[in-house]
Image (cartoon, rainbow, N blue to C red):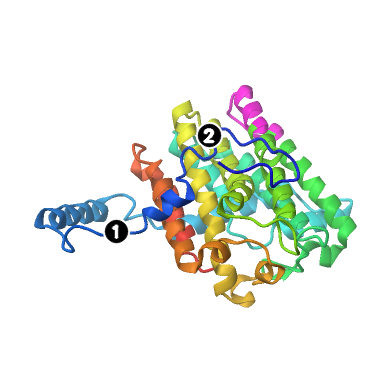
Amino acid sequence: MIPTTNFMYKIKPRTNASTFLHHFNQTLNLFFLPSSGSRFLSHQTVDNCRRQEIREEESPVSKFDFKAYMLEKIGVVNQALDAAVPLRDPVKLHEAMRYSLLSQGKRICPIVCLASCRLVGGDESMALPSACALEMIHAMSLMHDDLPCMDNDDLRRGRPSNHVVFGEHVSVIAGYALLARAFEHIATDTKGVAPGKIVRVVSELARLIGPEGVVAGQVADLKCGGNGQLDMGVEQLEYIHLHKTAASVEASAVAGAVLGGGREEEIDRLRRYSRCAGLMFQVVDDVLDVTKSCAELGKTCGKDLVAGKATYPKLMGVEKSMEYAEKLKEEAQEQLVGFDQEKAAPLIALANYIVQRQK
């Protein structure tokens, strides 16, 4: 459980935020083999492992072309984003909105939304407006994160940050405009879905990006950053990223599952999957920040280290951080057991991609 006394505000813990995650010490214990017992595997164990390998080779996941899937869905999302935020008056405002929204990105949140919708039996078209809205919200958060009063970063996705090109005042206003457009787009463009489900999606997104989610994480991040501010342990760091990165992915999965007509049990399992996947993304992001160059990442690297901010490699080391990411991947994929494995293949492969990515 995360201590609340170290934060500027007494932030209410998210419901069941850590029931699916092992406490840090428990997680580390799983990384090491028992000190006693045979060093060698029995014939039965070897046979079981081989049968598992055969099952994996024959599974829909092993035949799934994740790269082709990602390229296809990124194309669909980009086309929809271009149409959702056209260039119009006031021109400078819309140029700033489109500059960040249409920049090259992984589109993780929209793809999680679309895949979750299909997984529970829905048609992806039902979730496309919400998928676009999630990318609008994500773009807004990056624009504001880069501002001098926040993370003060001049590089984003391989080119100058929004405020460097358009000025701080326009960047702030363009972020607000994207946030408003996101909710308008869900309300007016979602088709074939009952109004009650649309209202629930709007409510879920507002909660997960608001003072119980992303905003709470950002406040804690600013309070517990470097430059002589409060020290942090792994639990406080996990709190921040469960409420920032993981909350955004959670909103994506829940929105897709709700729009696709998922049962509450299915929605809850996708909620747990996305929290693990979102936290895993941040752990790997921290590792890449200290192991890759700025050119490779397309953003300023090593900045948190220079600023003295807490990161997973700083607190755990690079090797243990990657072990933790692997454990989160296993926990995420466990939530997909029991679903149609062909439909679950994109989310299974996405978890593998997150932990293996190099940028």
CB within 8 Å, label 1 to label 2: no
The mark found on residue 182 in the picture is none
Q: Secondary structure at mark 1?
A: loop
Q: Which residue is mark 1?
A: 33
**Residue in the image at 47% along x and 46% along y:** 23
Q: Residues within 10 Å of mark 2 (few under 14, many from 20)?
A: few
Magenta-colored stretch includes residue 192: yes
Q: Would you say residue 319 is visible in this rendering?
A: yes
Expressed as whole percent of the image width and height from the top left, the position of residue 66 reads 43, 57
Q: Can residue 349 be seen by looking at this rendering?
A: no
Q: Quadrant of the C terminus?
A: bottom right
Q: Amino acid at mark 1?
A: Leu
Q: At x 75% / y 49%, what residue is drawn?
A: 85
Front residue (pair 144, 99): 144
**On the picture, is 243 further left or further right than 180?**
left
Q: Is residue 43 left or right of residue 246?
A: left
Q: Is residue 56 left or right of residue 147?
A: left
Q: Look at the image and say whether residue 10 sits in the magenta stretch.
A: no
Residue 110 in percent (x, y) is at 58, 48
User: Quadrant of the image for the N terminus?
Assistant: top right
- Give the left or right position of residue 122, taking residue 41 as reference: right
- Quadrant of the image occupied by residue 352: bottom left
Q: Earlier in the sequence, mark 1 or mark 2?
A: 2
Magenta: main secondary structure = helix
Amino acid carrying mark 2 in the image:
Asn
- Residue located farthest toward the left when viewing the structure as drawn: 43
Which residue position holds label 2? 16
Q: Is residue 147 above or below residue 133?
A: below
Q: Helix, strand, or loop for circle 2?
A: loop
Q: Position of residue 274 (x, y in %)?
A: 51, 44
Where is residue 37 shown, x and y percent of the image?
18, 57
Q: Which residues are magenta?
A: 187-203
